[in-house]
Amino acid sequence: MKSLFDRIVLKKIVDAIGLFPDRFAFCINEMHYTYRQFGQCVSKIRNKLSKADHFNTKVGLVINDDLETYASIIALWLEGCCYVPLHPNWPLERCQDICEQVELDLILDSSEQTRYEGVQVINTLALPYEQDCLMPKAGVSDEELAYILFTSGSTGKPKGVMIMRKNVASFMDSFWQTGIKITEEDRCLQCFDLTFDVSVQGYLVPLTKGACCYTVPHGQIKYIYASGLIEDHQLTFGAMAPSMLRYLKPYFEEIDATSLKSCILTAEACPLNLMEDWYKCATNVELYDFYGPTECTVYCTYYKLTKGGDNKTLNGIISIGKPLANCVGLVLDENGNECGVGEKGELCIAGDQVTKGYWKNEEKNASAFFYKEVDGKSMRFYHTGDLCYKDADGDIMYSGRLDHQAKIQGFRVEMGEIEWHAREFLGDINVVCMAFENKDALTEIAMFMETEEFNPEDMIAYMRTKMPSYMIPTRLFYVPVFPLNSSDKIDKVKLKAMIQ
Amino acid sequence: MEKNEIIEKLTLVFHEVFGDNNIVLRNDMSAADIENWDSLTHMLMITKVEEVFGIRFKLKELNKLKNVGDLCNTIEGKLQG
């Protein structure tokens, strides 16, 4: 009996390589690659991997935007290994911290020159193709890891979410049950960083169907490049973050997105009015709002919009709908009891898509997951930290975060992590970070420091060595004395009012 | 407007948007060369350029911009246009 992951994921990709050798698998940086070329690229990496001397089945992957990087993921999975993405543009220190946490002893890197020392690095670009090597390794359990993604952690260190092969198989099974149809004729947008799990949907949906995957190269301005891809290559499917559409909104009249058949909005709260405008460019599209934290493997709930119809919203934000086929979603109160219709509580998710936990983080694992009996069965739930309620139809309405997490360009950012690094530099100075919407309705980060004004260059330079650029505050405020509220806490409302 | 003047004004925009007064513009400079040049800062930069020069870009023009040199030429073309 083949494992679920072999059947639902690996076999489909290997089949596509065999069935459609001359169709395009990828379009990367204006270059098309066929499934034959992709299969050969997977094979050359797999061959090398099977001979490589490494103890850890978790392997670092420098995520360049090239065929080798995508082929490496499949090669690692065929070999029973898991990938840990290392972003080439992130500070080296952050990547090294990830290497140390996972004790990586092997890194796949297609860069001309690698940044990594003291660890075995395979330059995948230089490998020769000799023969096909596409049979999944036998006996790899669904309980093995597929990938570990590191997300922002409030204690100053990124935390790793462990996603097992079972989780990915279960997600893909859920995804196809939404009714979205993809065939080898489709052209799909993959505009998400491989450090971010929507990318897993971005490449798996086309590759398991023999369709073509169009990527956005690093160093390109994502929203502009993606709109060019949609128009120039007549893309038919893609997932995007609402902020991308917000950037594009001033240009909607110039965009022809009539080729789009289905489009997923995800990674952020999705405003209805923006979607109504998007329908005017993408006249033939079916729009979906998908929701899901990394911990629940890409998406765990979805809502299909009705063009010109009544779409459910809360404060203008579209409902995140109902749980996917393999997910259970409950809204719970502080005591862990299910809330009534219209009553707000925390959305908690159970099912086969839920992660096994955080990498070597017992404390977080103890607080983020819990067991609860549902229909006589004990289920393991994840606390999403999202405040929601269910309406009478069971559709989930999204109301906001319970903590200090924000989404910046779709990336999860803990304000606490930015504050932590700023304090490391500033010493005893009080720091508060806050996400806010600018006049273009885009999220920026403001940082308030309890000090006289100073030249921030050194501090910003320091922070850039610690965090990716999207986490660096774009507005700085120097406040000699922080205002306090009636309970003697820093008055964040007053601080926020300083942002014009 | 002379090319020099365009570059001078553009430099000030870059200093402000990217928060670094040491940026010296070169024609071949692109998003890969400035650490925090991403979608958000690009949008802020384009908005500021439109404001400073009193012009408005089309999406197709933005799509063709590969580097700072292209940006200067497009601004120059629009000012003359």
Image: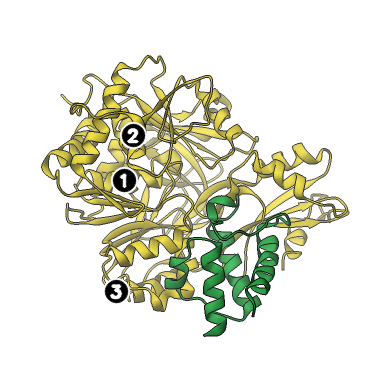
Chain colours: A yellow, B green
Q: What amino acid is labelled 2 in the image? A: Ile
* Residues at marks 1 and 2 touching, judged by CB atoms closer than 8 Å: yes
Q: Residue at x 78, y 50 (%)?
A: A456
Tell which subunit mark 1 falls on: A
Residue A203's disc is 1
When the figure is inspected, residue A51 is found, relative to residue A327, above or below; the finding is: above
Q: Nearer the viewer, residue A62 or A79?
A: A62
- State the CA–CA distance, disc 1 to disc 2: 10 Å
- State the CA–CA distance, disc 3 to disc 1: 25 Å
Q: Nearer the viewer, residue A61 or A155?
A: A61
Q: Residue at x 28, y 59 (%)?
A: A237
In the picture provided, is B26 more to the left or to the right than A236?
right
Residue A283's disc is 3
Q: Let me know if marks 3 and 2 both belong to one chain.
A: yes
Q: Quadrant of the N terminus of chain A?
A: top left
- State the CA–CA distance, disc 3 to disc 2: 35 Å
